[in-house]
Image: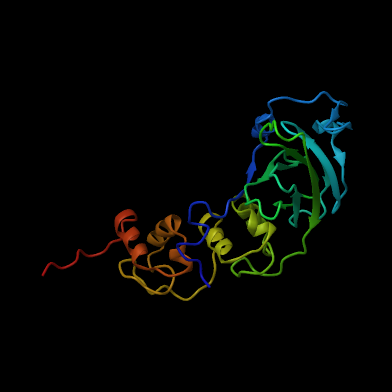
Amino acid sequence: MMPSRSSPLHSPGGRHAARRIAPVGLAALFAAHLGCTEVPGAPCGGGHPVANDTRERATPIGASGSVSDRLCFAEARFFRFPAPVPGGGIFTVTIDSAPRELGVVVTSATSGEGYWSHAPFVDGQQRVGVVSDGGNYAVRVAAPTARSDVAEQLFTLHVRALPAASNDCCSAAPGPGCADPGLLACLCERDAECCGTRYDELCVTQAMAECGLRCASAAPQSDGCSASLAPGCASPPVEACVCGIDPYCCVGGFDQNCVHLALNRCAAPCAAPEVP
């Protein structure tokens, strides 16, 4: 089934993305939402000592491991682990924190870049998909806001290596990822589900529109001025312009909406309609 215009990728409130941030943004992000910080070593909600409230005091959890902890609201906890897969492979960091959503950021110690999830909080879980650089990583877990009605929140982190994907990036698959690590590095910045849950038709669409993926397909039937059930049109510059606005036009079909974009926003050289 090809992506439709009502797919989550194009509709408000649908699938959100895992974003990658540059090192300059990490300090501000780590400091955000923290109204106060517990004194190191002080009890947390019933005598739990705080031993990992800074990156320097991060708790090691090992590759492909799990760890449970508790969090006072308006605080953060830090963990560290080696990448569970070589560079170019995919792994996930999943947090179980039912019934309340917590913030999780995964940061590369090599590049300083961070990944975090804005994916829906479903069944008490969030998942971050990461394309590995083969180095070490840190995880920060934080309560987004202070809560006066809750003393603490229990959570469990899981680090999991994913098997290498064998599908080419032009084909949807039931599992996450595809066989091009370079393209995945681009795509997983934009859509967490493509690297953490499944590589579906929407991932193919987004890879073509935003990450330079080119897939062999039947020759376009539209000249850019007429609708067609086949994707794309015969004018490369018009096609690039239209599909940059609406990727469906290059993956689904070059329908009347695509023709409208070609005429009104992409300077398609169409003859003016005859006036009877």
Q: Residue visible at 37% across and 65% down?
A: 235
Give residue 173's quadrant in the image. Answer: bottom right
Identify the coloring: rainbow
11 and 198: which one is in front?
Answer: 11
Q: Work out which quarter of the rendered image holds the C terminus and state it.
A: bottom left
Q: Residue 28 location, x and y as percent?
A: 65, 30
Find residue 170 and report its horizontal and vertical position in percent: 59, 68
Judged left or right of residue 106, residue 61 is right
How many marks overall? 0
Q: In the picture provided, is 216 more to the left or to the right than 130?
A: left
Residue drawn at the location 89% of the way across and 31% of the way down? 47
The relative height of residue 177 versus residue 138 in the rendered view (above or below) is: below
Q: Quadrant of residue 229?
A: bottom left
Q: Residue at x 86, y 26 (%)?
A: 42
**Residue 266 at x, y percent in the picture:** 34, 56
Q: Residue furthest front?
A: 149
Residue that appears at 81% across and 48% down:
156
**76 left or right, relative to 208:** right
The furthest residue to the left: 276
Of 255 and 153, the residue lying toward us:
153
